[in-house]
Amino acid sequence: MKRSVLVVAFLFLFSAVGFASPLTDFSQGKASIDLNWRMSNDLEYPGDSLDASNSNFDVGLTIGLGNKFAFQWQNQNAKSKDYSGTFTNGVDVLSGSLNSKLTANQFNILYSVDKNVAAFVGYTQAKNEFDVNGTYNGTPFGGTVSGKMVNGWQLGFTGSFPMGKNMSGYGTLGFGNKITNIEIGIAYEFAKNAELNLFYKSTEYKDLEFDGVSDKYDLKVKGPGVGVTFKF
């Protein structure tokens, strides 16, 4: 990790002392639940990259509304590992640790273009924050550098295609004023209406802010994942 993210978060606090194999049948009452675990992800800030912790879990829900429409909710959580460091200018000494935590939601309305492809329009939310603990010239401090909830919209497509017995490929592509979302994956149906998913996902959240700070920044979360989808 480069020192800029750590230093900015420390100084700010002291001065203040998209998813699994998609559901394609939108008949009323049809639904799917996605449970995903993402390992070895990166949280990329401008000029910095943090490694994610091993406890990043996402949840998704899609419900058929009938007449080719469905409602979808997707939740993404990304938390970095704990980072620590000590910085000095020859007089003052700043020492401590921090981690970064993102919480994001998507609320989409999907429309079935054909049996394998759906278009969607949605509302997005994202908030990033830092948990910081340390000492400044021996004086302890700690707390949370809170972020603002940033709201936006997106448009995109999601779909799947057969790859052989019990296997399919899938992908999602979404663009909006506060988000860019790309996902590709492979699904294996290991039981009736139950699938194992292997995927790679890259989501960029734009114009994030900290409370009390006017500067905006982007955060990209990217990396592989594994999950299960249950369809009803």
Image: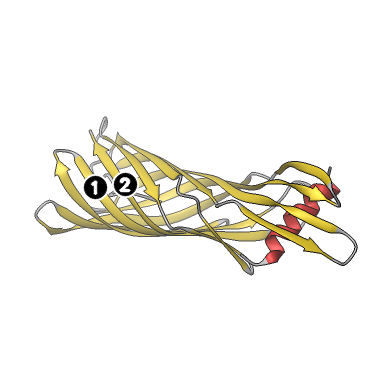
Q: Is residue 206 above or below residue 37?
A: below
Residue 51 appears in view: yes
In the image, residue 76 lies at what x, y percent?
Answer: 47, 46
Q: Is residue 175 above or below residue 211?
A: below
The 10 Å Cα crowd at callout 2, few under 14, some 14 to 19, many 20 or more, is: many
Q: Is residue 215 left or right of residue 177?
A: right
Q: Amino acid at mark 1?
A: Leu
**Residue wearing tag 2:** 227
Front one among 3 and 95: 95
Q: Is residue 204 left or right of residue 59?
A: right
The answer to which of marks 2 and 1 sits earlier in the sequence is 1
Image quarter hosting the N terminus: bottom right
**Residue wearing tag 1:** 196
Residue 181 appears in view: no
> Which residue occupies 27% across, 42% down?
229
In the image, residue 87 lies at what x, y percent?
Answer: 77, 62
**Cα–Cα gap, marks 2 and 1:** 6 Å
Residue 47 appears in which quarter of the rendering?
A: bottom right
> Which residue occupies 79% across, 48% down?
135
Badge 2 vs badge 1, beta-carbon distance below 8 Å: yes
In the image, residue 164 lies at what x, y percent?
Answer: 11, 58
Residue 171 appears in which quarter of the rendering?
A: bottom left
At numbered mark 2, what does the secondary structure look like: helix, strand or loop? Answer: strand
Front one among 4 and 193: 4
In the image, residue 152 lies at what x, y percent?
Answer: 57, 50
Image quarter hosting the C terminus: top left
> Which residue occupies 51% across, 45% down?
123
